[in-house]
Image: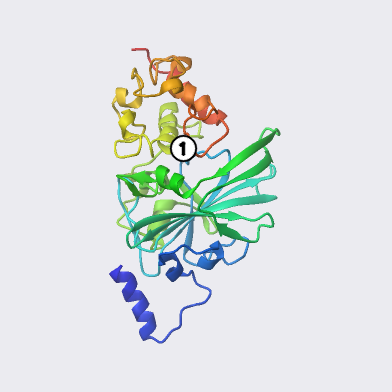
Amino acid sequence: MKRLAAVLAAIACLGAAPDPQAVALDALLAEAPAPKLADYRLFRDEAGRTPNGGLTPYALNTPLFTDYAEKFRFLYLPPGTKAKYRADGVLDFPVGATLVKTFAYPADFRRPSENVRYLETRLLIRKRDGWVAQTYVWNAAQTEAVLKRAGARLDVSFVDSRGQTRHVDYAVPNQNQCKECHQLDKAVTPIGPKARNLNGDFAYETGRENQLAHWSRTGVLSGAPKPAAAPRTARWDDPAEPVEARARAYLDANCAHCHGPRAIASNSGLFLGVEEQRPPQLGVGKGPVAAGRGSGNLKVGIEPGRPDASILVYRMASNEPGVMMPELGRTLTHDEGLALVRDWIAGMKPQ
């Protein structure tokens, strides 16, 4: 924060007025959230398609599944600041850092750049006292996104990559649900931007480049080693990578933010992060603590060689509230992700 204050003070001493077109850092750091996304000036256009200066686009090797929605991610850092590299966990972001994620659907996934409908833009803002989550929902005209603390339900239809029409009762999370998923040691924290999940290529306007290398070269990140020396999460949808690595990456992205030793579902004893290597903690041969009807009358989380006898598969396949996992963030079964986890369990040697 001292560095940020010094930057702002230096501008004032030079007699330069704040750039009215720059990102509104004062609004991001304000105690109360802005009523409209545009108030932060994170984008140059009303439709939120063109990021402002200081925003860096990024992607994750294996992201969270949200009813097949496309996601557009950006990182904003205040002038003169950098993120600090961490080999484990989320990168160390400075005060004022903002993670921007827009959820969208093309009308037809076979033409993903045409007729794209924005639904919501979520912000995670690193304020002086910690991270704060805020959600803005786009109007039908795609000209404005307004703050929604209580969440919302949106009717969505799209044609998938196989040419089938799909319908989604899309759920915009309320503020408490945001806190629930983003909770670590009872504090709100980002989930995705870890070194291992950023250690992959991104198609920048200047060409493809490894994200860790790009962030280091452009001054966004400090202290990072060469990408080859950094940890890396597998891409769940890359058939060239081992099935186990892909399945573990998928569970890490979709489950570990709750099912971890410091997360909200720690009392389950089921820890699904990629760091976990103990079979019982992964669910292998492990009975449920309190699954109730969520167990589907099955005995263990993972039955090696038998995906149909595994509670993990049963809950991933379900769309029934109180049974399905993850319990937030989806209403549809992720067929491809489920098939991957089934293949992984089927390939395990029975104990």
Say which residue appears at 41% left-offset and 87% top-offset: 15
Q: Nearer the viewer, residue 156 or 219?
A: 156
**Rendered location of residue 295, percent (x, y):** 43, 20
Q: Nearer the viewer, residue 235 or 267?
A: 267
Give left or right: position of 315 versus 212: right
Write down the quadrant of residue 301 in the picture. top left
Tell me the amino acid under the disc marked 1: Arg
- Circle 1 sits on which residue? 235
Classify 42 as above or below 315: below
User: Which structural element holds mark 1?
Assistant: loop
* Image quadrant in which the C terminus is located: top left
**Rendered location of residue 57, percent (x, y):** 50, 56
The answer to whether any part of residue 151 appears in the image is yes
* Image quadrant in which the N terminus is located: bottom left
Q: Residues within 10 Å of mark 1 (few under 14, many from 20)?
A: many
**Rendered location of residue 116, percent (x, y):** 66, 50
